[in-house]
Image (cartoon, rainbow, N blue to C red):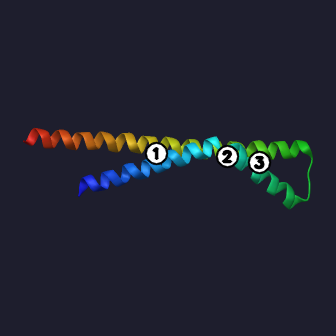
């Protein structure tokens, strides 16, 4: 029972890692899309303000992706370590 829960947590961790990497590498596309939609909703703006908004959105996606990647990587490493401890305890019991 415990092994199945650990394996499912590892899968969740890998999903977080992949999602974080996707957000990091696609941050320019996502940031540009959000900045363009902001520009359309305002009906136009100065190019300097647009650049600030664009950099802000790109940085938001970079930070969010980094947090997801870091949390997922930490989860995978900790669960893998726990999984190894369980294996060692079962080997020593035999």
Mark toward the viewer: 3 or 2? 3
Residue shown at the point (59%, 46%) measured from the top left: 22
Residue shown at the point (30%, 39%) measured from the top left: 81
- Report the residue marked by disc 1: 72
Query: What is the spatial separation of the Cα atoms under label 1 and label 3, in whole angstroms?
Result: 26 Å
Q: Earlier in the sequence, mark 1 or mark 3?
A: 3
Q: Position of residue 54 (x, y in %)?
A: 78, 45
Please identify the quarter of the rendering in which residue 8 is found: bottom left
Please identify the quarter of the rendering in which residue 42 is found: bottom right
Q: Is residue 36 left or right of residue 80?
A: right
Q: Position of residue 1 (x, y in %)?
A: 23, 58
Tell me the number on the disc at residue 22: none
- Report the residue marked by disc 2: 60
Residue shown at the point (55%, 45%) measured from the top left: 20
Q: Is residue 22 left or right of residue 3?
A: right
Q: Position of residue 87 (x, y in %)?
A: 20, 42
Q: Which secondary structure lies at badge 1?
A: helix
- Report the residue marked by disc 3: 32
Q: Earlier in the sequence, mark 3 or mark 2?
A: 3
73 over 4 or under it: above or below: above
Query: Which class describes the residues within 10 Å of circle 2: few (<14), some (14-19), or many (20+)?
Result: some
**Front-most of residues 46 and 12:** 12
Mark toward the viewer: 1 or 2? 1
Q: Position of residue 31 (x, y in %)?
A: 73, 48
5 over 92 or under it: above or below: below
Q: Is residue 37 left or right of residue 69?
A: right
**Front-most of residues 73 and 26:** 26
Q: Which secondary structure lies at badge 3?
A: helix
Query: What is the spatial separation of the Cα atoms under label 3 and label 2, in whole angstroms?
Result: 12 Å
66 over 39 or under it: above or below: above
Q: Earlier in the sequence, mark 1 or mark 2?
A: 2
């Amino acid at each position: 029972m415990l092994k199945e829960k650990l394996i499912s947590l590892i899968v969740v961790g890998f999903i977080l890692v992949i999602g974080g990497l996707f957000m990091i590498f696609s941050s320019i596309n996502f940031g540009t899309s959000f900045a363009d939609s902001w520009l359309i909703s305002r009906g136009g703006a100065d190019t300097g303000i647009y650049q600030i908004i664009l950099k802000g959105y790109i940085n938001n996606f970079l930070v969010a992706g980094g947090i997801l990647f870091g949390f997922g990587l930490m989860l995978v490493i900790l669960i893998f370590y726990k999984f190894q401890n369980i294996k060692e305890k079962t080997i020593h019991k035999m």
